[in-house]
Image (cartoon, rainbow, N blue to C red):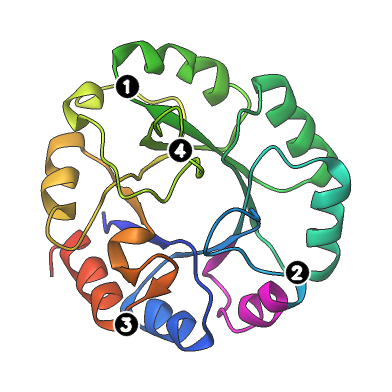
Amino acid sequence: MAIRVKICGLTRPEHIAVATDAGARYLGFVFFPKSPRCLTVSAARELALLGPPGVAKVALVVDADDATLDAILREVPIDMLQLHGSETPARVAEIRARFGLPVMKAVGVADASDLAILPAYEAVADQILLDAKPAKDAVLPGGNGLAFDWRLIAGRAWMKPWILAGGLTPQNVAEAVRLTGARQVDVSSGVETAPGVKDADLIRAFIAAARGE
């Protein structure tokens, strides 16, 4: 089975083309004001419309209320919601039911104790995204270029599809896939030359390395 790659935090039209031409299966758009990758609704709409059919357009939000989600989904052709805040399992279920879209719930991991919540989220989300847990004083809940100990999830039996994130780069993604058995990987800062500045060559290199090409 081919590895499915998500390129997150896209902000420029040319990188939509680069990512999809290289084989990305998800395009991530950030709606979190503190992020250097944050988009306005109108900018996200323009970018999402460039994504070809069959490539999922994902909206990353952090503890968004219904009004915020309404505003995004009214204008942007989104296929999946990525909840990257402290949303409870109940809130995940509520969002999934209200908006009728698949939901990917991000879970921060620092040590084995952080895995205890996974069954509760697997029961209500369509997919789980595992990211490195940010430091207590971190501004961003993700996209910090940090990795967690991949051995924590090696051999785990999963109830739902899952995606590995956190500190992945073209140099380490193949090893991450080997250690964890991941069939899906997510990258943001690992294909940037500066916060929020994607690099076409790094995007291509990441996707090729993830797929073992």
The numbered disc on residue 157 is: 1
For the point 55% across and 56% down, which residue is it? 35
Foreground: 44 or 174? 44
Q: CA distance from mark 2 to mark 3?
A: 24 Å
Q: Nearer the viewer, mark 1 or mark 4?
A: 4
**Type of amino acid at the residue the image marks with label 4:** Ala
177 horizontally vs 30: left or right: left
The numbered disc on residue 200 is: 3
Callout 3 touching callout 4 (CB < 8 Å): no
**Type of amino acid at the residue the image marks with label 3:** Ala
Q: CA distance from mark 1 to mark 4?
A: 31 Å
Judge whether 139 appears above or below 77 on screen.
above
Q: Residue at the front extreme?
A: 137
**Type of amino acid at the residue the image marks with label 1:** Ala
For the point 38% across and 74% down, which residue is it? 198
**Type of amino acid at the residue the image marks with label 2:** Val
Callout 4 touching callout 2 (CB < 8 Å): no
Residue 2 place in picture, x, y as percent: 27, 59
